[in-house]
């Protein structure tokens, strides 16, 4: 892996799990890491741990609620006022909710955190990424995306909601759907960025021991996650592909691909449907009130 000294890297959801391990590894390489988290206290605790373990004091903490589009816009404005470049954006934050919840802005919460949030954050920081090229966008998806189904007429999952059913693979769970959307977003984004020097890739970290299920809100879900822990890989192991894509010269010109265990892999057939990708992009722009390019 190449050294990252002097590079500015944004990692969302970096106070725990894969995000924290990604931030830690990049900090060890000398990167200036901007940890984007929702909770100030937990984020500061993680930041201090990373500084202590790496000896790298160039670790910044910024607050953003990825379920709130207003918070994302505010964060992006603040970030661009503080930094004049961005080399790596890792859209890592993710969540799964057992009950259907709607944010104050009217978005189903799983969709907001896992898909709309990364879409909008990337949009808001894209100008900076382009002016900093060569630069990288890295989106974290999931192997469960293969169980997802994108219904353009029901992106808000009003017809059916199955949160933790993602792990028993029943029907088309919301979590899996949002992670499929992340793949499709990445592939479409990579085409739109052709010739800019900005690459966009997606990854599947594997079955990782994280805090993903803590938002499920049910005892049965908590017990299920506890039971499968022995089968899961560590967050450190799960972060290896994120770190590889952020730092390795081997993939500096690679774009529009998916990786697992630091190897390029194919994803489910639906993820490659270019017409569906374009329609999803357009629908997303409308939902977020973004001017179409």
Image (cartoon, helix red, strand yellow):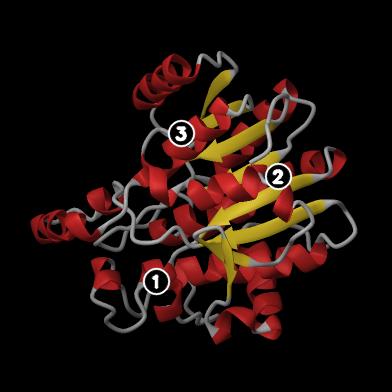
Along the line of sight, the residue nearer the viewer: 9 or 277: 9
Q: Counting residues from the N terminus, which is met first, the one under dot 2 or under dot 3? A: 3
Task: State if disc 3 and disc 2 touch (CB < 8 Å).
Answer: no
Task: Please provide percent x and percent y for residue 223.
Answer: 10, 56
Q: Is residue 48 above or below residue 293?
A: above
Q: Counting residues from the N terminus, which is met first, the one under dot 1 or under dot 2? A: 2
Q: Secondary structure at mark 3?
A: strand
Task: Please provide percent x and percent y for residue 248.
Answer: 67, 46
- Residue found at x 51% / y 34%: 25
Q: Secondary structure at mark 2?
A: helix
- Residue found at x 47% / y 17%: 51
Q: Which mark is residue 37?
A: 3
Image depth: mark 1 or mark 3 in front = 1
Q: Counting residues from the N terminus, which is met first, the one under dot 1 or under dot 3? A: 3
| Spatial CA span between label 1 and label 2 | 28 Å
Image depth: mark 2 or mark 3 in front = 3
Crowd band around label 3 with a 10 angstrom C-alpha radius: few (<14), some (14–19), many (20+)? many
- Residue found at x 38% / y 29%: 39
| Spatial CA span between label 2 and label 3 | 17 Å
Task: State if disc 3 and disc 1 touch (CB < 8 Å).
Answer: no
Whether residue 108 appears in this view of the structure is: no
Task: Please provide percent x and percent y for residue 273.
Answer: 65, 84
In the rendered image, the quadrant that contains the C terminus is bottom right
Q: Which residue is mark 2?
A: 124
Q: Which residue is mark 1?
A: 144
């Amino acid at each position: 892996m190449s050294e990252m000294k002097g590079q500015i890297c944004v990692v969302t959801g970096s106070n725990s799990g894969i995000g924290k391990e990604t931030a830690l590894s990049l900090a060890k390489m000398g990167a200036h890491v901007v940890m984007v988290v929702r909770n100030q206290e937990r984020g500061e605790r993680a930041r201090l741990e990373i500084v202590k373990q790496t000896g790298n004091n160039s670790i910044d903490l910024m607050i953003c609620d990825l379920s709130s589009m207003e918070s994302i816009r505010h964060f992006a404005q603040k970030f661009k006022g503080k930094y004049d470049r961005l080399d790596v954006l890792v859209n890592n934050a993710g969540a799964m909710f057992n009950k259907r919840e709607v944010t104050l802005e009217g978005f189903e919460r799983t969709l907001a955190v896992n898909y709309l949030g990364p879409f909008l954050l990337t949009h808001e920081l894209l100008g900076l990424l382009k002016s900093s090229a060569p630069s990288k966008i890295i989106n974290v998806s999931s192997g469960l995306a293969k169980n997802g189904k994108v219904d353009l007429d029901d992106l808000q999952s009003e017809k059916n909601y199955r949160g933790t059913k993602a792990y028993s693979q029943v029907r088309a769970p919301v979590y899996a759907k949002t992670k499929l959307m992340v793949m499709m977003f990445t592939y479409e984004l990579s085409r739109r960025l052709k010739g800019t020097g900005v690459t966009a890739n997606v990854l599947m970290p594997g079955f990782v021991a994280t805090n993903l299920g803590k938002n499920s809100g049910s005892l049965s879900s908590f017990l299920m996650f506890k039971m499968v822990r022995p089968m899961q890989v560590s967050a450190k192991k799960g972060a290896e592909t994120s770190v590889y894509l952020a730092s390795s010269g081997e993939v500096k010109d690679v774009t529009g691909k998916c990786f697992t265990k630091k190897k390029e892999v194919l994803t489910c057939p639906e993820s490659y449907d270019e017409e569906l990708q374009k329609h999803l992009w357009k629908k997303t722009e409308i939902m977020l009130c973004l001017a179409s390019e």
